Amino acid sequence: MNDWLNLLIGLAMGLNLVALGTSRLPSLIRVAALQGMVLGIMPLVIEHELRLLAVAVAIATVAIKGLVIPALLRRAMRTANIDRDLHPLIGFLPSLLLGAAGMIGAVVLASRLPLLPEHHESLLVAGSLASVLAGLLLLIGRSKAISQVCGYLILENGIYLFGLLLIHSVPLLVEGGILLDLTVAVFVTGIIVDRIQRAFDSLDTRKLTVLRE
Amino acid sequence: MLLTFALWAYVAGMAGALVLQRAERLANVLGFGLAALGGVCGVVFSVSSLAAGRAVTIAPVTLWSGPIPDVRLVVEADALSCFFVLIVSLVGLAISVFSLGYARTYYGRKNVGVLAAVFNALLLVTTLVFIAGNLWMFLIAWELMALLAYGMVSFEHEDREARQAGVLYFIMSHLDAACILLGFLMLAQAAGDFSFASLRGIGAKLSPQQRDAAFMLFVIGFGIKAGAVPLHIWLPVAHPVAPSNISALMSGVLIKTGIYGLVRVCFEFLGPPPMWWGASLLAAGTVSAVLGVLYALMEHDLKRLLAYHSIENIGIILMGIGAALMFLHTGHAVLASLALIAGLYHTINHAVFKALLFLGAGAVLHATHTRNMEEMGGLAKRMRWTSLFFLVGAVAISALPPLNGFVSEWLTYQSLLQGFGTTTSLVRLMFPLGGAMLALTGALAAACFVKAFGITFLAQPRSDHARNAHEASLPVLIGQGVLTAACVFLGLFPTAFLKLLDPLTQQLTGHQLSQQLTLANGLVLSDATAQGGTVSTLGITLMAVYLLPVPLALWAMFGRKARTRIAPTWDCGQRGLTPQMEYTATGFSKPLRMIFKALFRPRREVQREYDFSPYFATTLRFESHMEEVFQTRFYRPVNLWLLRLSRRLRALQAGSLQAYLIYVFITLVALLLFAS
């Protein structure tokens, strides 16, 4: 059971690095979607018996994170008609190195946190921290609005991983609520991306500085 | 339960006035009528429970408990709460009646429903501040009070002055709330609980440095609210621009919440005080009293003058409380009770006569449409009742016997004079010094009110505004009449009133003094020591009444034969006296301005244009200014420094999303490192 879970978390952590290293927008979206699907399967692995609710949430997660959100993002990308290059603020190699350093730091940190005995074996906390750090790195290091959404998605995946720690005490319904929020957020961002493109002729968020007081 | 009823009356008044804000007459009657009803209930409640001598009137009641543990709104009432509820209810009652008439002046101009609703809300939250039983309740009510008062200061927001005053008040309120919050959090951390019950005597658990820090925070926080020098700058700006009934409430009651907080914290929470606490309060009180009255003397805006007098009186109250803390340190519990009684007695006295004077100023303001005293004059003939009430208030605030100001200041003197013998350290010099300064304050206050009353009400009208003035409406007069009656009662029957303070001193210092303070047939006030002074205000009054036949008899014997001759006032051979020849407010205060030149830094500018000789000027232009020392020497430099600092910090606000995210990231990593 734990092995399967750790395998999935390891996969997700690997995907973090892929996301940091990729230079093309469509592949970034694909990575984020893949990570979302990996995370979606996890409740099924954790739960001892398959309850209807857990299955429903898993399916919804996979569907929304893996299909709906990427579709929305691709649509936004198409309608805004932007070029597929990522224009990094932090280069790909430094990003990768920072991401790897963050991952090591997360594992070290997780081993030093006062956790419950049953969580010592699993990579949940480490994976969660690593994903949050990777998401933040993406948010800082990429300037396009859509890549920021992807960074945000990965960050949220980290939070989701942390939430899995509490899966037995917090109903998955909460997770369902977060999922809904996320979808709406991406939906709204998709619209905003279009507007930014029209107003600034670019999706570079650095140009938004002219809006400051 | 009378108090519950009073609170519901305020709530109903608030809701009713808001609902009926389209029908302004109805909103006025309903809003202020219910406020008056609540005031009556509050007075009856507090007087009856104080007279019964109960230490705890309402045991802690949980009004609301939130989903988060420890977040609860609790009310409780002990003797100290009841005393302050008495102040807010009594003054609130009188002001409500006054407002029934006064609010008519806003018909068609401003939203009377909102005025009445906010007035009710202010009474409600102020009462809640006094009966709060835990920190949540206290701080929420405290903040609401500041917010509502801010709304009322900028009620006439068309006026630039009112808007600026509102902003200043808002900033200072936040500063004081921040200090109080920090102080209370220090206490609550030591207690592990937010209820007042568990905070009692919690100072013992803190280290001396922590206690001193907490004391300083509370002094700054409550000092701002009370308007003690040098934290007073908002008071003379904010009080005058509010509608007069709100000014009366602010000056009479709201600044007393600072006194309430100080007493509550210093006597109950912080534990045995070191000497310097009391000494610093006494010093602050002395400075406030003297500076307050000196600045008041220089004012010719009637309401600003009264606002400066609030600073003076807060100073006198603080002198009593500071002296009480010093006596607690030296172990003289009886003297501590005496000084505390003096301070608290002055608290209610000031509430009553300052509200009365502000109401009088409101009536005058309405009649003449100006706050400038130089444009008034001759109102005594046009507004007989108002001028009589104002005169009573002026006599009371000048601490002249037999009215109430005299009683409490006499008690303050007695405690200060006794203080010299309580300790051998050099600190004892503060007592006679404070007493001397109090005497100076009293004399200057009398001079100031000679000016205020004389220039406003006597002689000939100085402008058309004053010439066309008319007496105020009946409710306006009744409101002032209630407070006048309270002034007279508190002045003539202090021995009766002092009994109400017994449960209070029992609670705070463990002594009941009213027996020792009362001599002979219960009408003579003593200072609780064997060889101390005694005085009877009632005796003084009766003496005056008894002696009244003497001049009558003298007149009957000798004066009747003298011829009565009616002639114009002697006018040095000029023809006819005009208002221009009258003494002006500025002229009246000139000698004092010259004496205290170093403080006021007066500056005047005279421009004279002439053709042949400077003695025959064609035009004259005269301007005089005084430097506002605290603003220019302290607040403005601090303000400039803050602005410079924030301009530097603005570099952080690059406007770039990525930069902000880096801040978040750095914070997160720092927190993680800190946590591990």
Image: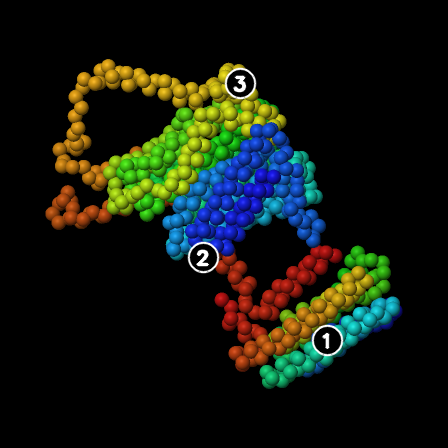
- Residue visible at 54% across and 35% down in the picture: B44
Q: Nearer the viewer, mark 1 or mark 2?
A: 2
Judging by the rendered image, the residue that carries numbered circle 3 is B529
Left or right: A49 in relation to B465: right
Which amino acid type corresponds to the residue marked 3 in the rendered image? Thr
Separation (CA) of disc 3 from disc 2: 61 Å
Residue A131 occupies which quadrant of the picture? bottom right
- Label 1: few (<14), some (14–19) or many (≥20) C-alpha neighbours in 10 Å: many
Q: Please tell me whether residue B289 is drawn above or below residue B662 in the rendered image.
A: above
Q: Position of residue B141 (x, y in %)?
A: 57, 47
- Residue visible at 15% across and 42% down in the picture: B615
The residue nearer to you, when weighing B609 against B532, is B532
Which amino acid type corresponds to the residue marked 1 in the rendered image? Lys
Q: Please tell me whether residue B242 is drawn above or below residue A90 in the rendered image.
A: above
Instruction: Please say whether residue B23 is visible from this viewpoint.
Output: yes
Separation (CA) of disc 3 from disc 1: 84 Å
